[in-house]
C-alpha cells in the first residue's frame, strides 16, 4: 500500500496538525548544564491521562470543527468538557473495516503502537488518550498539536540548518523509542511530523507501523509514500527498520534544500539507481552532506542507522554535535519558536473542511450481531 503521488494532500491524520498561524515568537536560552550523552530514550512519565481511568463517551466532548477527512473517516477538533482539554478525535467508520481486512489489521497495529507510546508519554511521539466507540464508529482520542506540520513549515521555503538539526533530533529520539519497542514506522514524511505549541516536533500517524522485535527482523508488505520509500521497498525486497532511516535522510534533505531528494519523471527509478545530488546554489555544511549521504545509502546494511544500535550511530553523527540529548529528551533544550493561538482557533485550517458540519452519519450502519468484531477498540488509560 503505497502512495502514487508525493504531492502533499490533506489526510485524516495530517489534519490533526493542520497549521495554526505562527503569531508570536519567543527566544529561549538553552540550558548549559547537563551531559550531551543520552543513556535514556524515555523521559519521566507526564501526569495522568485526561480519561482519569474512566471510559470516554461521545457526550463528554464538544465537537468544535472538522479538521480533515480521509478515506476511512474524519478528524475533529474537540473539547473534552470534564477536563477542558482540546483533543483531536479520529472517527473511523466500522463499515470500512468490514470491507477492508487489511485496513482492520493496520488499525489494530496503530492501536498497539499508540498504547505503547501512551504508556511512556514520549515527548516526540503523538500522545494517545484512549479509544471508544459508537454503534457505527471507532474513535481514537489523540493529542492535538497546535504548531502545524513540517509540510506547512516548508511552504515558507528551506529552513536554517540549526532548525533542521533541532527537528531532526526530535524525530531521531522518536524513532529510537519506536525501534527499541519493536515498531517500524514505515511512513515517515514531513506531513507526519507535527509541531506542538512549544515548537517541538512529534511523529504522528502510526497506521502503517509494523511490529518486529529485533533490528534485523525482516518485513515484506510493501507500503509507504513513494518519494520516501527506500530502494529495497521499491524493488519489493524484504526489508528491515532501516527503511525509517532512509526516510529520515529524505526528510533532512527536504528541510535543508526545500525540494525533493529524488525527482524526475520516474521517482522509483531515480531512488533505485541515482545517487543523491545537492543543489549548487544552496549552502549546507559538510556535516549535513555527510549525514544525508549516509542515510541515503542504497544498501541497507551500509546505511547509517542499520542494526541494533542504529539510533545511537545516527545521534553520534557530526551533524548533531551541538545537541544535548538528555536535555532535549526532557524538553529543556528548546527551539526558538513558540506557536501561540487560542486552542479552538481554526482560521488556518482548510476552509473546505472547517465549513462542514461537525455532525455526520456513517455511510453504512453496523448490525448488533457484528459489534463483537470491534470489542477490542476500547482503551481506558490510567
Image: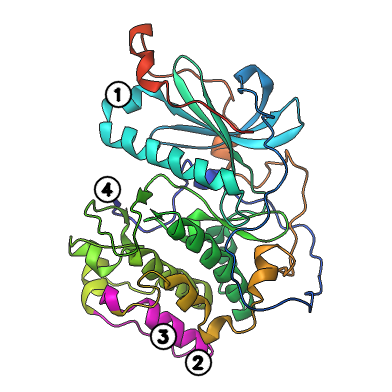
Q: Is residue 263 magenta?
A: no
Total marks shown come to 4
Q: Nearer the viewer, residue 28 or 49?
A: 49
Asked which secondary structure carries label 4, the reply is loop
Pointer 2 or 4: first along the chain: 4
Q: Which mark is residue 286?
A: 2
Front label number (4 vs 3): 4
Q: CA distance from mark 3 to mark 1?
A: 46 Å
Q: Position of residue 360 (x, y in %)?
A: 51, 20
**Callout 3 touching callout 1 (CB < 8 Å):** no
Q: Which mark is residue 98?
A: 1
Q: Earlier in the sequence, mark 2 or mark 3?
A: 3
Give the extent of the magenta segment.
274-301
- State the scheme by which the image is colored: rainbow
Q: Which is more N-terminal, label 2 or label 1? A: 1
Q: Is residue 148 positioned above or below 233 on the image?
A: above
Q: Is the Cβ of the residue at disc 4 closer than 8 Å to that at disc 3?
A: no
Q: Using a 10 Å C-alpha cutoff, classify the residue at mark 2 as few (fewer than 14 neighbours), some (14 to 19) or many (20 or more).
A: few
Query: Mark 1 vs mark 4: which is more N-terminal?
Result: 4
Please report the residue visible at 35 percent of the width from the left and 20 percent of the height from the top: 373
Vertical comparison of 241 with 131: above or below: below
Question: Of marks 4 and 3, which one's residue comes earlier in the chain?
Answer: 4
Q: Which mark is residue 322?
A: none
Q: Residue 278, which numbered label? A: 3
Task: Give the image location of residue 312, x and y in percent.
Answer: 49, 74
Distance from the alpha carbon under mark 1 to that under mark 2: 51 Å
**Circle 1 sits in a helix, a strand or a loop, which is it?**
helix
Question: In the structure shown, which secondary structural element does the residue marked by tag 2 occupy?
Answer: helix
Looking at the image, do the residues carrying marks 1 and 4 touch, with CB atoms under 8 Å apart? Answer: no
Residue for badge 4: 1
Give me the C-alpha separation between circle 1 and circle 4: 18 Å
Amino acid at each position: 500500500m503505497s502512495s502514487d503521488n508525493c504531492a502533499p494532500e490533506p489526510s485524516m491524520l495530517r489534519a490533526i496538525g493542520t497549521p495554526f498561524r505562527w503569531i508570536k515568537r519567543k527566544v529561549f536560552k538553552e540550558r548549559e548544564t547537563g551531559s550531551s550523552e543520552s543513556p535514556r530514550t524515555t523521559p519521566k512519565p507526564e501526569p495522568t491521562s485526561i480519561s482519569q481511568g474512566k471510559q470516554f463517551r461521545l457526550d463528554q466532548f464538544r465537537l468544535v470543527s472538522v479538521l480533515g477527512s480521509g478515506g476511512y473517516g474524519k478528524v475533529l477538533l474537540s473539547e473534552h468538557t470534564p477536563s477542558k482539554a482540546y483533543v483531536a478525535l479520529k472517527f473511523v467508520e466500522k463499515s470500512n473495516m468490514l470491507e477492508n481486512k487489511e485496513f482492520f489489521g493496520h488499525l489494530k497495529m496503530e492501536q498497539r503502537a499508540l498504547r505503547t507510546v501512551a504508556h511512556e508519554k514520549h515527548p516526540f511521539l503523538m500522545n494517545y488518550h484512549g479509544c471508544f466507540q459508537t454503534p457505527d464508529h471507532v474513535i481514537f482520542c489523540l493529542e492535538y498539536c497546535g504548531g502545524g506540520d513540517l509540510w506547512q513549515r516548508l511552504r515558507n521555503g528551506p529552513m536554517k540548518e540549526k532548525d533542521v538539526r533541532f527537528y531532526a533530533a526530535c524525530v531521531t529520539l522518536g524513532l529510537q523509542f519506536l525501534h527499541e519497542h519493536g515498531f517500524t514506522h514505515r511512513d515517515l514524511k514531513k506531513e507526519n511530523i507535527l509541531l506542538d505549541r512549544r515548537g517541538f516536533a512529534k511523529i504522528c500517524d502510526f497506521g502503517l507501523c509494523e511490529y518486529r522485535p529485533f533490528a534485523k527482523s525482516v518485513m515484506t508488505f510493501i507500503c509507504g509514500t513513494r518519494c520516501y520509500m527506500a530502494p529495497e521497498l521499491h524493488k519489493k525486497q524484504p526489508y528491515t527498520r532501516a527503511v525509517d532511516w532512509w526516510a529520515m535522510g529524505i526528510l533532512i534533505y527536504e528541510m535543508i534544500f526545500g525540494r525533493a531528494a529524488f525527482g524526475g519523471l520516474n521517482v522509483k527509478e531515480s531512488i533505485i539507481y541515482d545517487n543523491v545530488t545537492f543543489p549548487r546554489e544552496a549552502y549546507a555544511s559538510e556535516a549535513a552532506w555527510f549525514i544525508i549521504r549516509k542515510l541515503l545509502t542504497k544498501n541497507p546494511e551500509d546505511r547509517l542507522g542499520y542494526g541494533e544500535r542504529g539510533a545511537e550511530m545516527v545521534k553520534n553523527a557530526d551533524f548533531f554535535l551541538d545537541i544535548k540529548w538528555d536535555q532535549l529528551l526532557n524538553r529543556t533544550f528548546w527551539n526558538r519558536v513558540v506557536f501561540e493561538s487560542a486552542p479552538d482557533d481554526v482560521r488556518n485550517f482548510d476552509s473546505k473542511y472547517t465549513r462542514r458540519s461537525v455532525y455526520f452519519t456513517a455511510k453504512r450502519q453496523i448490525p448488533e450481531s457484528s459489534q463483537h468484531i470491534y470489542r477490542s477498540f476500547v482503551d481506558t488509560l490510567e
